[in-house]
Image: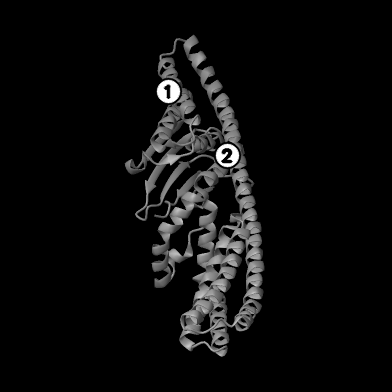
Amino acid sequence: MDTPNPLAHGNRFQRRYYRWALPYYERFGREDPLLRERVELADIYLYSRQGLGAWAGWLLCLLGGAAWLHGNGMGLGKALAAATTIMLGLSIALLGAWLKPHQKPRRVVGGFMGGMAAGIVAMLLGVSVGRALSGKSLDLGSALTALQASAATLIPLGLSFALLLIGVARAGRLARERQLARLQLVAERDAAARTAAEADLRLLQAQIHPHFVFNTLATLQHWVDRRDERAGPLLRELTGFLRRSTELLGRPVVPLADEVQAVRHYLAILTARLDGRVQGEVHIARNLEAELLPPGLLLTLVENAVEHGLEPKIGGGLLTLAACREPDGRWWLRVDDDGLGLADDAEDDVGLANLRQRLRHHFGERARFTLQRRTEGGTRAEIFITPEPA
């Protein structure tokens, strides 16, 4: 199911029933995931307020059947027992036809009709044997009359049940087909989202690397030509950045520690290139280093802060990357800069739009991204992650 089973968090009876039924749900899921979903939906309906009408109708049918049998000469206790047996059998058969409509209800109907015919014959033979053992002669006319009366009652009931069973099975097949179509649509949407995210990631990689790398190479070439001693350290940082970022962007998820290391290379290169005008600080809680993220998220935030806030600012500024976990398990990533600040008409560029999409695809509703002005000047970009429910 797409949503948690509400019985697991319902009243005491619902929770107890869910714990009892959970092993069966899991077994059904191993056999057929669609069957598990259908069984859970049926239970949710029957064991909530929505199902009170179904239970009331079932009880009225049972009492009506018992009253009819009692009115035809059967004792009250026997009438209730017989009506209960019939209703349970009917309910199980109809539920089976609904949950497993692919099991050809004709066979079930044929078995039921055959069993009913065998029961009539057995009743006739029993009457005959009983009369023979008691020394009475077989009254063929009375036996045929009893057989006719039984058939007149049982055959219409059997045919009505057969038509009902076929109708329920047909409705079950249609519901299962709609269920399959829905799951297929969801799978196609997920595949399309993954394809789009991968395409956007390649686009993001193509956008970040040339702009940043070409500027760094130009600086490096200038320093090499002048035999500037800063060329060697810059080349090492550039090599480390390219190696680290290329490895990251080739994986679906990466540990936060690896992403932070790529950001350190990036900031070291900027500090060298801009003669110290841009300074970077990194403060990451140790208990977050193993958390997994889609690759390139921090690089996107840092690159956006530098490009739109710090580089255009006269005199440069400070960029701070921080990450911390709250006592309730939530954690956040924050990129602060004291640059020019967020423009009034600012809109997401391709990188930030890509970041929002990939956060939504990877974390769903558990992730939230904000971009806002800081009261002390500059911009704050923040990602909040809520842990998965236990």
User: Which of the marked residues, 2 or 1, is nearer the chain's N terminus?
Assistant: 2
Most foreground residue, 209 or 380: 209
Q: Is residue 173 above or below residue 235?
A: below
Residue that extends furthest to the left in the rendered view of this protein = 286
Q: Is residue 105 above or below residue 89?
A: above
Q: Which residue is mark 1?
A: 240
How crowded is the residue under tag 2: few (<14 C-alpha within 10 Å), some, or many (20+)? some
Q: Is residue 290 above or below residue 26?
A: above
Instruction: Tell me the kind of residue under disc 1.
Output: Gly
Res 41 visible: yes
- Tell me if label 2 and label 1 are in contact, CB under 8 Å: no
Residue displayed at 61% across by 84% down: 142
Residue displayed at 64% across by 46% down: 345
Q: Which residue is mark 2?
A: 194
Which quadrant does the C terminus fall into? bottom left
Res 49 visible: no
- Write down the quadrant of residue 176 in the picture: bottom right
The mark found on residue 47 in the picture is none
Position of 171 with respect to 223 (left or right) is right
Q: Secondary structure at mark 1?
A: helix
Instruction: Give the image location of residue 62, x and y in percent.
Output: 54, 80
Residue displayed at 54% across by 37% down: 304
